[in-house]
Amino acid sequence: MYDKTLAEQSQALANGDISSVELTQSYLGRIKQLDQHYNCYISVTEDLALKQAAAADTRRANGEAGALTGIPLAYKDLFCTKGVRTSCGSKMLDNFIAPYESTVTQHFQDAGAVMLGKTNMDEFAMGSSNESSYYGVVKNPWDTTAIAGGSSGGSAACVAARLAAGAIGTDTGGSIRQPASHCGITGIKPTYGRVSRYGIVAYASSLDQAGPMAQTAEDAALMLNTMAGFDHRDSTAIDKTVPDYTATLNDSLEGLTIGLPKEYFTAGLDNRVARQIQQAVAEYEKLGATVKEISLPNNELSIAAYYVIAPAEASSNLSRFDGVRFGYRCDNPENLEDLYKRSRSEGFGEEVKRRILVGTYALSAGYYDAYYIKAQKIRRLIRDDFLNAFKECDIIMGPNAPTPAFNIGEKCDDPVAMYLSDIYTLSVNLAGLPGMSIPVGFADNRPVGLQIIGQHFDEARLLNTAHRFQQVTDWHLKAPATAALI
């Protein structure tokens, strides 16, 4: 049953073909045998999962089940889960047991979903390769010498390896779309404010957004139906009616206009990736869509703007981790200053410390106007570019990353090269737009994903666009050879 999509598993549970306990046991058995090869999970909550599965079976027997009741899911380890460790992939929070539940995980709990465990991630979501985790690198199930992508690499890899029916991740600058692309699965970053951030440990508050990761667009739509909605506890949540994202999945694509930014298809894009993207776009033309070239002239500025704004917000958000209130504390501090210095220097990894330093510098007196304010002005220009482009097209398509997944360790000594791998995804977060990735092929056995970008709160159109493609292709159904080991 693990090789079935989430939607198919939901139907099997409804038909009585399998129980949630049996389905959950199957996944737990696979995790025990296979996760040693991938390192997807930081924590596996076996006892809790079986308890929730039994409760789900009872709900179903009482006629109280929904689409996600009894479905085994995995949560990125920065969603607070009451009574369960929430580490953020960091030594700093290695011993932190969340005292409350995030809104997103509470929604899944209320829907009767089963939590298999918490997935590995770049430390505090800072990274593009899942190599900055305190718990070790996540390996790509398609090729274990390759990265899984970041920062939601554990969530992407566990879905690709069929170690969960679906997973949730967060996307600050591409952290759902890029690992989804590298692992050959479907992932969507909703419009900023569409999903509550309450209970998600913050990296960059004006950019972070949670979203679903699954095999198919239909699965992602089912998950987003549960995740989305207004939350009075999140001051950035938007009070806007949530549609049924499954209702329009099969709508026709006749008359859809697809914009291809000329800035995306330059010398910096790997020819193998470009070929797969072009073939996918050609398939959309067969489905009735029209294609036109558009321009996003300020896209090249997105890396510079993002790596000022995001570190600045991280510097502020991570100031709470000081060895006093919770989290890691150094041994035998000499005084308060020593406590602060050693707790933070010992508790944070190199990439986190790098971004804190950059952010603190950008916010310091004398540099705030020169860097932070200027970056925010560029952010507005990037947003305006998208709004102008959407006057000419309905959606925008392009790559998620300039190359397929690169080898583990290949870019660890060159942070700038690592940052450049986010060139196609950062601008979407800066503009607060929804974006998603769907699998469209391979480059030397490493998956390639197509990025689809929509207008604000146009997730339904993105999911419809993705679903119709998946109706006539089978890239989303392909699984790594290791997924069939047991």
Image: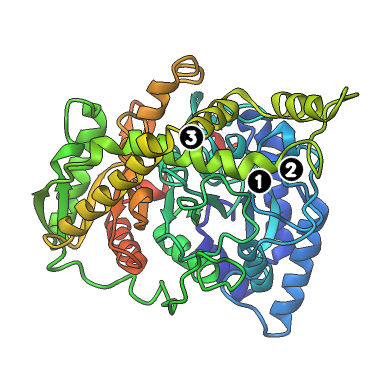
Residue 88 visible here: no
Q: Quadrant of residue 235?
A: bottom right
Q: What is the three-letter code of the residue carrying label 3?
A: Ala
Residue 195 visible here: yes
Residue at 18% across / 45% down in the picture?
296
- Left/right placement of residue 122 relative to residue 43 reads left
Image quadrant occupied by the N terminus: bottom right
Contact between labelled residues 1 and 3, with CB atoms less than 8 Å apart:
no
Mark 2 residue element: strand
Sequence-first tag of 3 and 1: 1
Which residue, given by chain and number where applicable, does mark 2 sit on? 43
Q: CA distance from mark 2 to mark 3?
A: 42 Å
Which mark is nearer the camera, 3 or 1?
A: 3
Sequence-first tag of 1 and 2: 2
Residue lying at the far bottom in this picture: please name it. 63
Q: What is the three-letter code of the residue carrying label 1?
A: Asp
Q: What is the three-letter code of the residue carrying label 2?
A: Ser
| Residue 78 image offset from top left, x and y in percent | 64, 48
Residue lying at the far front in this picture: please name it. 366
Which residue, given by chain and number where applicable, does mark 1 sit on? 77
Residue at 60% across / 23% down in the picture?
350
**Viewer-closest of 321 and 17:** 321
Contact between labelled residues 3 and 2, with CB atoms less than 8 Å apart:
no
| Residue 380 image offset from top left, x and y in percent | 28, 51
Which residue, given by chain and number where applicable, does mark 3 sit on? 365
Sequence-first tag of 2 and 3: 2
